[in-house]
Image: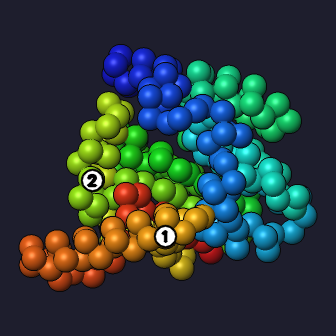
Amino acid sequence: MSQLRELAIEQYAEHYARLNVSLDPHILAGIKELKRMDLQYGSLIAILPQGSKILDLGCGTGYLLYWLSKYGNVIPVGVDSSISQVKLAQNYLPDTDITCEDGLQFLRTNSNSFSGIFCMDVLEHLPTLDACLELLEAIQQALLPGGFFVCRVPNAANLTGGYSRYIDLTHERAFTSLSLLQLLEIAELQNCQTIPIRAGHLSGRIRLALEGFLHKIVFRICGQNSAEKTFTYNICAVGFKK
């Protein structure tokens, strides 16, 4: 790992603070955000049996863990390699199991442990595509049979994809929905599909509709009548272990 990259990861909380209104998950995951996550991921969580362990891989300061804690049937677990972010997460969520460790090593020591694994805004940070595949293979091993894997990455098909790609010195790539599904399928995840980005309020739904309409027009003007259907700032996808 380069010296700059190592320092950037260690001090990531400071950079994260510039991009968000707060580091506190109780503020980040406000009522609208909690509703949005319910709409996007709630159906995956609600059907799980009591005591199911859900891992937030690259948990940051813990906003997803905070949402998971609202579901009484699951046990949230977090891991992140950034010391600064883990310290904040442990402070904000003292009753949640949060570990500071390299995600790949954590997965390899927790085989067949999780009913679901979330990996939000992580794959774009890995140094190579081979590293992405290695992580997904380890995720496969850490999932219980039938378990789900959900990831979110920057969308190169969005008009602001270049901004998303270069907003962070540790970003190495962006994806489209097609290339993200390609990666998940290469890693032998099953029933892979995108999860539409949802909004928890009316103005957000209007904005998403306008965003999609604008991008479809631009793609048509540019002669790109392709299979691409996802134009939101980020892409979410899910796949399942055999």
Is residue 112 visible in this depiction of the protein?
no
Q: Tell me the tag on residue 228.
A: none
Q: Are marks 1 and 2 in contact (CB under 8 Å)?
A: no
Residue carrying label 2: 161
Residue 109 coordinates in the image, percent (x, y): 69, 41
Secondary structure of residue under mark 1: helix
Number of residues whose C-alpha sits closer than 10 Å to that of mark 1, classed few (under 14), some (14–19) or many (20 or more): some
Q: Quadrant of the N terminus?
A: top left
Q: CA distance from mark 1 to mark 2?
A: 20 Å
Q: Quadrant of residue 40?
A: bottom right
Q: Residue at image x 75%, y 53%?
A: 68
Q: Quadrant of the C terminus?
A: bottom right
Residue 129 coordinates in the image, percent (x, y): 34, 50
Camera-nearest residue between 26 and 59: 26
Question: Looking at numbered disc 2 in the image, what kind of residue is underneath it?
Answer: Gly
Q: Residue at image x 74%, y 62%?
A: 115
User: Which mark is first along the chain, 2 or 1?
Assistant: 2
Q: Quadrant of residue 89?
A: top right
Residue 194 coordinates in the image, percent (x, y): 47, 72
Q: Quadrant of residue 108?
A: top right
Name above or below for residue 123 compared with residue 191.
above
Camera-nearest residue between 120 and 79: 120
Residue carrying label 1: 205
Q: From the viewer's perspective, is 234 left or right of 13?
A: left
Question: Looking at numbered disc 1 in the image, what kind of residue is underneath it?
Answer: Arg
Q: From the viewer's perspective, is 209 left or right of 37?
A: left
